[in-house]
Amino acid sequence: MKKNLLIVDDEPSICLILKYYFGPSFNVVVYPNGLEAITWLKQDHRPDAIVADYAMPIMDGLDFIKQVRSIPAHKHTPLIILSGKDETSHKIKCLKQGADDYVVKPFNPEELDLRIQKLLARIKL
């Protein structure tokens, strides 16, 4: 049975790449901003992992992480932030807020896949 992957990114090209890459192994749900994704999550949808952009309209990555972690069912859902910012301070802020990982754009989808698989494997333990 396929796992569910939530992608939250306002860049259509990133969404297409991730949907194409992860489509064979995941049921992929895509939202263009954090507010729509949070609304979906609050409707009791349960993705196995979340990949979200840092720089999004309406709600930035830090606010998105905070909102996700405030939903009891998603306190421990693996959450990876994608960002064009490579500054250590950004990475630290996201990790302190509750992100499980931080991947800098441009990225290799295979690397992102391995990071997701590692996080999912840890949950099984």
Image (tube, helix red, strand yellow):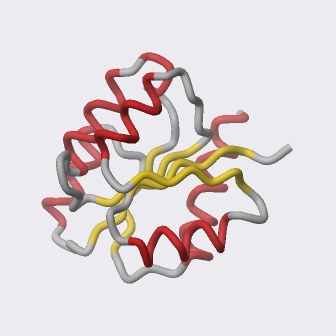
| Depicted 14 relative to depicted 31: above or below | below
Q: Position of residue 125 (x, y in %)?
A: 71, 33
Q: What residue is drawn where x is 57% and y is 50%?
A: 29
Q: Quadrant of the N terminus?
A: top right
| Depicted 14 relative to depicted 42: above or below | below
Q: Position of residue 40 (x, y in %)?
A: 46, 33
Considering every residue shown, the one lying at the far right of the view is 1
Considering every residue shown, the one lying at the far top of the view is 72
The foreground one among 62 and 10 is 10
Q: Position of residue 86 (x, y in %)?
A: 22, 74
Q: What residue is drawn where x is 79% and y is 47%?
A: 2
Q: Position of residue 39 (x, y in %)?
A: 38, 30
The foreground one among 118 and 13 is 13
Q: What residue is drawn where x is 64% and y is 36%?
A: 123
| Residue 118 in the figure: left or right of residue 124 | left
| Depicted 15 relative to depicted 58: above or below | below
| Depicted 51 relative to depicted 107: above or below | above
| Residue 67 in the figure: left or right of residue 60 | right
| Residue 23 in the figure: left or right of residue 110 | right
Q: What residue is drawn where x is 55% and y is 76%?
A: 17
